[in-house]
């Protein structure tokens, strides 16, 4: 499912809303999550999962093509931990 | 860095501010978004949100684990797990620590 398919499904189930509004809703949600992560905040959505950022130390990397050493700067990466309820749903239908 | 935790309350408030639905309906729509994504994932479908990232379901085979407290070997049954891959844009935005307005959309 892509973002536009998600918007289409939501629009179908909410015929009283303009598709344009559904689009803004979806965009706003992910934009807020991204903004929070950019501030270093955590986003916790019970039952769904939690987004956070983790630090990565600077390291010596290698260009895989040439083998040349390159310095990789320290950085932060986004991280998602699946919520308990969603994790259980993923495994619900296959008889454990 | 701050280290606040954002929850449904702040996200639905943002939807309320941005779209002009009632607070109640904003909260309902946030729930609907998470619900649609969860349902697709539970079906084993990958969910790709452009400029944010993608969620994919991966199947793991059985393996032997260990109870870290007792050291006892226990089988870990085959399971499905969710992996999130952030988009390049999200990674960039987080490292810049600023809103990458130019790359929006």
Image (cartoon, coloured by chain):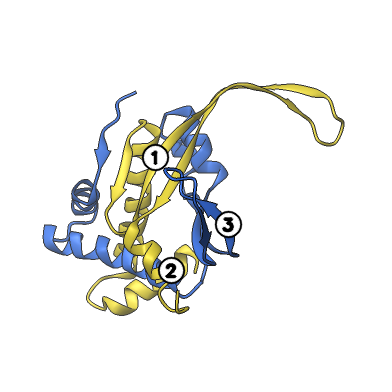
Chain colours: A yellow, B blue
- Chain bearing tag 1 is A
Label 3 and label 2: CA atoms lie apart by: 21 Å
Residue B35 position, x and y percent, is 32, 68
Give neighbour class at mark 2: few <14, some 14-19, many 20+ (Cα, 10 Å): many
Residue B64 — which label? 3
Residue A39 position, x and y percent, is 35, 31
Residue B65 position, x and y percent, is 54, 53
> Is residue B85 visible in the rendered structure shown here?
yes
Give neighbour class at mark 3: few <14, some 14-19, many 20+ (Cα, 10 Å): few
Residue visible at 26% across and 33% down in the picture: B4
Pick the residue in front: B23 or A79.
A79
> Of tags 2 and 1, which is closer to the observer?
2
Same chain shared by disc 1 and disc 3: no
Instruction: Classify B23 as above or below B5.
Output: below
> Of tags 1 and 3, which is closer to the observer?
3
Label 2 and label 1: CA atoms lie apart by: 21 Å
Residue visible at 45% across and 68% down in the picture: B41
Give the residue pinned by disc 1.
Answer: A52
Drawn side of residue A11 relative to residue A53, left or right: left
Give neighbour class at mark 1: few <14, some 14-19, many 20+ (Cα, 10 Å): many
Residue A53 position, x and y percent, is 43, 36
Label 1 and label 3: CA atoms lie apart by: 29 Å
Instruction: Classify B83 as above or below B35.
Output: above
């Amino acid at each position: 499912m892509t973002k536009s398919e998600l918007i289409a499904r939501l629009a179908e189930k909410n015929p009283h809303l303009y598709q344009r509004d559904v689009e803004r809703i979806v965009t706003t949600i992910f934009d807020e999550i991204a903004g929070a992560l950019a501030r270093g905040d955590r986003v916790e959505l019970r039952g769904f999962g939690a987004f956070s950022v983790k630090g990565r130390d600077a390291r010596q990397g290698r260009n895989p093509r040439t083998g040349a050493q390159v310095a990789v700067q320290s950085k932060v990466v986004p991280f998602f931990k699946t919520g308990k309820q969603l994790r259980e749903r993923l495994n619900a239908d296959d008889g454990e | 860095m701050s280290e606040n935790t954002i929850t449904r309350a702040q996200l639905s408030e943002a939807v309320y501010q941005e779209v002009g639905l009632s607070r109640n309906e904003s909260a309902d729509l946030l729930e609907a978004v998470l619900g649609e994504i969860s349902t697709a994932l539970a079906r084993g479908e990958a969910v790709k949100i452009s400029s944010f990232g993608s969620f994919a379901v991966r199947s793991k085979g059985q393996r032997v684990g260990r109870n870290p407290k007792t050291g006892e070997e226990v089988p870990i049954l085959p399971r499905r797990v969710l992996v999130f891959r952030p988009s390049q844009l999200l990674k960039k935005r987080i490292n810049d620590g600023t809103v990458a307005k130019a790359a929006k959309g």
